[in-house]
Amino acid sequence: MPAQFAHDVVVVGGAGHVGLPLAIALADRGANVQIYDVSESAVDLVNRGVMPFLEPGAEPMLRKALDAGMLGATTDAAIVGQARNIVVVIGTPVDGHLNPDPTAIPTALAACSTHFRDGQLLVLRSTVYPGVTALVERMIAGMGVDIPVAFCPERIAEHRAMTELFSLPQIVSARTDAGRARAAELFSLLTDSIVHLDPEEAELAKLFTNTWRYIKFAAANQFYMIANDRGLDFERIRQGLTKDYPRASDMPGAGFAAGPCLFKDTMQLAAFSDNTFSLGHSAMLVNEGLPLYVVSQLEKRFDLADLTVGILGMAFKAESDDIRSSLSYKLRRVLKFKAKAVLSTDPYVGEDVDDTLLPLDAVLEKADLLVIATPHAEYRGLRTDKPVADVWNILGNGVIV
């Protein structure tokens, strides 16, 4: 590391689900890493060796890195000027009209750009709207500093970060040879498998990946509805058609397709497309419509206005405490309008996140009807004489109730 930089890497926005695992992984591989984040509570937790969210295997590595003096966190933006590599994990959001805001990253960078220095590398890590890398390049050029810009999208799934950061190929892109070499050098700390693309190719590669998954989930959910409408068990059909048949092996099961990435990135791709992205919009209608479908099916069987409904699981995925964009909350909103009362529970979501949640035993006792909204392993051994809507089929019930 050149003498003018005290640290190898600073991760901007680095106390969250994308940045913190990356910071820990780089520190574990010998880089001196600092985290810059505006959340004082998250920074405090990190510096005390406590993960602000669930990520298996991360906390022991965090403490090891802290003890070795290889990792620290701060709310002081000046730290940005002290690192050779700046990794930004701020993504492109979509607004209430599903339009991406391509200025979000340049606006966020402006808050710490006064600390940028010649000789640094700026890496955009989160998903961005196509063209944002070029927009940031123009921003940097206008500042008159010699900083190449790279786009190296994260590829991890929550709860697999501390494995996948070291096992998955890393996509690296930059406009210049120097930028590509610097980015490859950085991410070679994690893996020997580096995939080189141009920035615009890498931007689309990330969006294509998440949109492809979202479309596959939509196809499975549509198949589920078709089978369920005929009183047939979609999961039994899926298991039959995929058994020892490689061309169907990637067909997922049915379930709520949610979280902070898949829906958002599909809408970003739709906004970018010059043609109507009917496939993406159709996937959105199917996946976002599944909670409504569940409620409509329950209405055919039960007088919901006289029943208390218990929702099991509010996180967007199994064994997670992350409720961002969780369809469990959409389900709850609809049921609050339809049912006499709605109760909710989740073994991972804390009271500081949702103080309306009850213990599982209380929900099982008070509810007349249950909906498994998140397939937590805890629910697999559920024994109850009450009707259960189980889209995920974790109880093996087959049809919706």
Image (tube, helix red, strand yellow):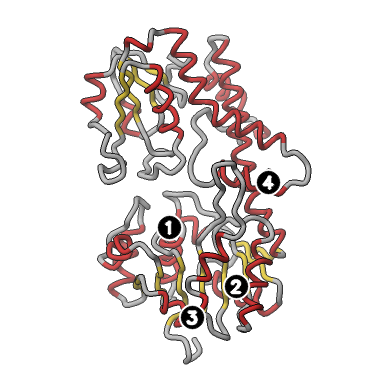
Q: Which residue is mark 4?
A: 271
Secondary structure under the numbered disc 1 in the rendered image: helix
Most extreme residue toward the right, as rendered? 275
Three-letter amino acid code at the position of disc 4: Ala
The image quadrant that residue 155 belongs to is bottom right
Sooner in the amino-acid sequence: mark 4 or mark 2: 2
Q: Residues within 10 Å of mark 3 (few under 14, many from 20)?
A: few
Separation (CA) of disc 2 from disc 3: 20 Å
Secondary structure under the numbered disc 2 in the rendered image: helix
Three-letter amino acid code at the position of disc 2: Ala
Secondary structure under the numbered disc 3 in the rendered image: helix
Q: How many marks?
A: 4
Three-letter amino acid code at the position of disc 3: His
Nearer the viewer's eye, disc 3 or disc 1?
3
Separation (CA) of disc 4 from disc 1: 33 Å
Three-letter amino acid code at the position of disc 1: Met
The reply to whether callout 3 and callout 1 are in contact (CB within 8 Å) is: no
Q: Which residue is mark 2?
A: 183
Please state if 351 lies on the left or on the right of 247 as rendered.
left
Sooner in the amino-acid sequence: mark 2 or mark 3: 3
Separation (CA) of disc 1 from disc 2: 20 Å
Nearer the viewer's eye, disc 2 or disc 3?
3
Does 312 sit above or below residue 266? above
Residue 217 or residue 351, whichever sits in front: 351
The image quadrant that residue 355 belongs to is top left
Please state if 167 lies on the left or on the right of 361 as rendered.
right
Q: Image point 32% across, 23% down: which residue? A: 342
Q: Which residue is mark 3?
A: 115
Q: Which residue is mark 1?
A: 162
The reply to whether callout 4 and callout 3 are in contact (CB within 8 Å) is: no
